[in-house]
Image: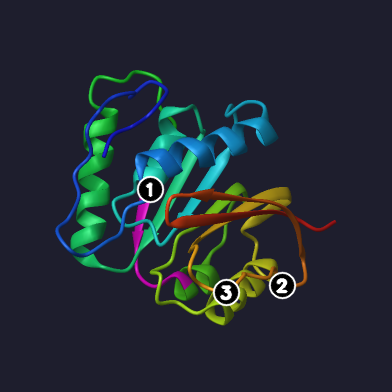
């Protein structure tokens, strides 16, 4: 696993054994291609990576120029790998946005969050999470201060699971398949 583009391009990332299912390099490349086409530029972007695992997706955003990246991960070992990967990405890089890794459950983070909203939120929950559980998390996001106006939200699901439906408050924009992963994109409804 490596950073694909930006200031930390090519840096290899750590992966904890048997704890996470990192988003593949191929899927990350496709996800960021889609996001870049929507955003135009990463300057000033605040990015939230929920169920961060190794932090590879959030760190990719940071490498590409996101101003703020926050990751949320419940597993202590994966959280430490996420923080270690930030050290790898930031080594020798002069201009890099702000990074913070939060330990704990996603629902707890959403309930207690305050501060600046995010332009992009990425959710890659364990594949055993039901679509209903993810819809509940998304609904909680709409009641929080975490969504910037016109925020883009992307959800990664296994392609073998039945189709995912966005709850009220989101407007679906596209779906992309990358190997076994299916990524759903939406924007926050006005």
Q: Position of residue 58 (x, y in %)?
A: 42, 44
Relative horizontal placement of residue 12, taking residue 106 as reference (left or right): left
Q: Position of residue 84 (x, y in %)?
A: 20, 44
Q: Give the crowd class for mark 1: few <14, some 14-19, many >=20 residues within 10 Å.
A: some
Q: Which residues are magenta?
A: 100-106
Kindly identify which residue carries mark 3: 162
Which numbered disc covers residue 167? 2
Is 101 part of what is drawn in magenta? Answer: yes
Given this view, does label 2 or label 3 mark the residue nearer the observer? Answer: 3
Which of the two labelled residues, at mark 2 and mark 3, occupies the earlier sequence position?
A: 3
Which of the two labelled residues, at mark 1 and mark 2, occupies the earlier sequence position?
A: 1
Distance, label 2 to label 3, CA atoms, is 15 Å
Relative horizontal placement of residue 130, taking residue 36 as reference (left or right): left
Kindly identify which residue carries mark 1: 100
- Helix, strand or loop at disc 2? loop
Kindly identify the residue that appears in the image at 35 percent across and 53 percent down. Answer: 101
Q: Position of residue 185 (x, y in %)?
A: 64, 52
């Amino acid at each position: 696993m490596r950073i694909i583009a930006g200031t930390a391009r090519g840096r290899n990332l750590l992966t904890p054994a048997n704890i996470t299912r990192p988003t593949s390099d191929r899927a990350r490349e496709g996800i960021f291609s889609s996001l870049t086409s929507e955003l135009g530029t990463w300057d000033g972007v605040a990015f939230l990576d929920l169920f961060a695992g190794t932090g590879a997706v959030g760190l990719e955003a940071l490498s590409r120029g996101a101003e703020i990246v926050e990751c949320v991960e419940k597993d202590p070992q994966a959280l430490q790998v996420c923080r270690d990967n930030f050290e790898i990405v930031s080594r020798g890089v002069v201009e890099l946005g702000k990074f913070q890794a939060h330990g704990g459950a996603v629902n707890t983070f959403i309930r207690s969050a305050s501060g600046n909203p995010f332009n992009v939120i990425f959710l890659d929950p364990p594949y055993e999470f039901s679509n209903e559980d993810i819809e509940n998390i998304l609904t909680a996001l709409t009641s929080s201060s975490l969504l910037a106006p016109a925020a883009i939200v992307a959800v990664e699901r296994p392609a073998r699971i039945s189709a995912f439906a966005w709850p009220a408050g989101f407007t679906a924009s596209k779906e992309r398949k990358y190997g076994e992963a299916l990524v759903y994109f939406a924007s926050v409804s006005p």
